[in-house]
Image: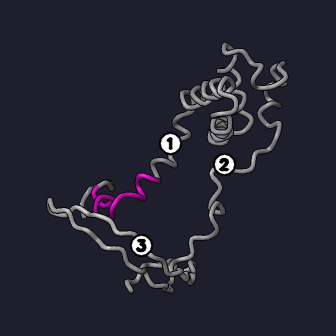
Amino acid sequence: MSKTYVRPHQRKIRVTRKGYYRKGFYIHRNGKRIYIPPTYIPPSTYYIPDRGAPGKGKQVIPPLKKGKMNRIAKKMGYERVTDIPDTKLKEYAKRLVNAYGAKRAFGMTHAQVVLRKRTQPQHRKKFEKIEHHIAEMYGHRLTPKSAIRAWESMSPAARAKAMPGGEI
């Protein structure tokens, strides 16, 4: 059995597979048609890295707290964010950033865009506009994370070349 790399904190789990009968099938290799006859696949036991329970990985959208975005809308004189007219969305985006910071405000609006993707497409467009305004006005505050990701994905040699001086 070939060894696979397992992170130090990652355990291995034992998998016991039942035996079964496989149907015959054709494969094409080097322009020829080869028939693989039906056969019995015996039961086997092997170990794999534990990948956790399905759906129990890192959450894509953090838990949302109700009313944070509506609080800013109420200060502007509207009941909720979806009531704000398109002409006032830029002002709303500024107030949202002043209250929560550019990165957090962008994340809040992006979460709303994702959540309303299928259920409320008419409101989704409004949140996309708010998101666009934040990115347009405060994009310089949002970029460091992507720059760090790009830096981490580089090979050590490419990283050394990108450093000031650019020599390995």
| Residue under the image location 72 percent in, 15 percent down | 85
Count the marks: 3
What span is in magenta? 149-161
Residue 41: percent from left, percent from top:
42, 80
Instruction: State which quarter of the image contains the N terminus.
Output: bottom left
Q: Residues within 10 Å of mark 1 (few under 14, many from 20)?
A: few
Specify the label residue 82 is tagged with: none
Where is 111 relative to 20, above or below? above
Residue 53: percent from left, percent from top:
64, 68
Amino acid beneath label 3: Arg
For the question of whether residue 12 can be seen, the reply is no
Amino acid beneath label 1: Thr
For the question of whether residue 15 can be seen, the reply is yes
Residue on which the image places disc 3: 22
| Residue under the image location 77 percent in, 33 percent down | 69
Query: Which of pointers 2 and 3 lies earlier in the amino acid sequence?
Result: 3
Where is 54 relative to 126, above or below? below
Between marks 1 and 2 in the image, the one whose residue lies nearer the viewer:
2
Query: What is the CA distance from the residue labelled 2 to the residue labelled 3?
Result: 42 Å
Between marks 1 and 3 in the image, the one whose residue lies nearer the viewer:
3
Residue on which the image places disc 2: 61
Determine whether the residue tagged by mark 2 lies in a helix, strand or loop.
Answer: loop
| Residue under the image location 42 percent in, 79 percent down | 4
Residue on which the image places disc 1: 143
Query: Which of pointers 1 and 3 lies earlier in the amino acid sequence?
Result: 3
Q: What secondary structure prevails in the magenta region?
A: helix
Q: Nearer the viewer, residue 69 or 25?
A: 25
Where is 143 relative to 37, above or below? above
Residue 67: percent from left, percent from top:
83, 36
Amino acid beneath label 2: Ile
Residue 158 is one of the magenta-drawn residues: yes
Instruction: State which quarter of the image contains the C terminus.
Output: bottom left
